[in-house]
Image: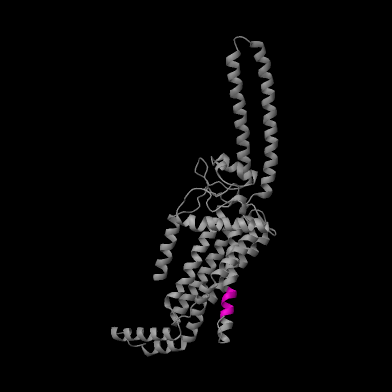
Amino acid sequence: MKKIKIISILFITMLVTGCSTVLKDKEGKVVQYTEKNVCETCNQKCELIDLKEEKENIDNESSEIETKEQENKETEKENIENKETIKEECKNKCLETCENAKKTQTGQNLTGNILCKPTDPNIIELYENNNVDLSKLPDCKNLSISSGTYEGIWTTLFVKPLAWLIVLVGNIFKNYGLAVIIITILIRLALFPVTKKTAMQSEMMKKAQPELKRLEKKYENLKDQQSQMQKSQEMMAIYKKYGINPLSGCLFSLIQIPLFFAFYEALNRLPIIFEGKLLCFNLGITPWTAIFNYGHYYYIIIVVLVGILTFYSFRLNQTASMTGEQQKQMKIMSIFSVVLITIMSFRVSISIALYWIFNSAFTVVQNLLVKRGNKNDHII
């Protein structure tokens, strides 16, 4: 119960102190990077050019109609021809734009409070058409920790530094997907001394299991308050004997959840990430869009990896249960969590999925190393 309260408070705190917002149009609809939206934006721009030319022509005719009637007629004819030419050129350009968008569209929801400028001309058009002033934003490759205005403690201390680090590593390796993987591993290596303790607690709990079962059997039929207090004292003595901290189970979650949300925020607010690729995978697209909209069935690999690694990560990180009933509940919760996360992975971008895959893979390897060390009576 304490674990749930702590995580809930942390989650609420992160939400109220700064988070990404989706970009919406004048009608309140979420703006997505799709061929349809790009084409509509381009065609609207052509219509605006037409109206602008028409207004200028009317103004010219009004000011000169009394003195240069014949000249105005000729000018009007030329203006009509110019309008038709400009409109035709604009429409042709839109056809090229639409064709390009068809190849690069990701179906992603565009983020309203991005940290830097996008580089894709189609995405730039979508932002400018929805009144986002990109001139105030730095180029993504030149992003710094101090860029932009103050947005709260969460964004200032976690999101922006992480976004800057991703861009820095991405610039070095010329690939932002690879940057996400490298930073995920580096952070987990830095936190290894802390997260290793959680893994060790699970192993120590398993060693203490025989004594805990005997304790449960001893007090099985004793439900009075004094007996229960005595049981609690003996249980704490067993925990002390094996170096078990009952609250250590919260440690992994308290580290994992803020990291996930920090990555989620940083990646969502970096347009340059969503424009990149890793191997044949577009970092901005979701598996759902790639599979069901464009028939790129190989994206199912990402979903499968998320499911498998999450399953083994949870399984190896579980603390041994004290009773058969608790063990059943833990198993049901784990299965439900794995299924839920796997389903959710269809709807998150590949960049987010990469973080989850390599983070879970690190947890699996870490716990296997701890298990092997325990078998050899030597904890690494």
In the rendered image of this protein, does residue 35 appear above or below residue 204? above
- Please tell me in which quadrant of the rendered image residue 13 appears: bottom left
Q: What residue is drawn where x is 67% and y is 30%?
A: 87
Q: Is residue 369 on the magenta stretch?
A: yes
The mark total stands at: 0
The chief SS type of the magenta part is helix
Residue 161 location (% of width, % of height): 54, 57
Q: What residue is drawn where x is 64% and y is 49%?
A: 105
Residue 12 location (% of width, % of height): 42, 59
Part of the protein shown in magenta: 364-370
Regarding residue 1, the answer to whether it shows in the image is: no
Which corner quadrant holds the N terminus?
bottom left
Residue 40 location (% of width, % of height): 61, 40
Which corner quadrant holds the C terminus?
bottom right
Regarding residue 95, the answer to whether it shows in the image is: yes
- Please tell me in which quadrant of the rendered image residue 37 appears: top right
In the rendered image of this protein, does residue 299 appear above or below residue 243? above
Is residue 253 rendered to the left or right of residue 166?
Answer: left
Image color mode: one colour
Q: Is residue 146 on the magenta stretch?
A: no
- Please tell me in which quadrant of the rendered image residue 326 appears: bottom left
Q: Nearer the viewer, residue 12 or 217?
A: 12
Residue at the extreme top of the image, as rendered: 67
Q: Nearer the viewer, residue 178 or 34?
A: 178
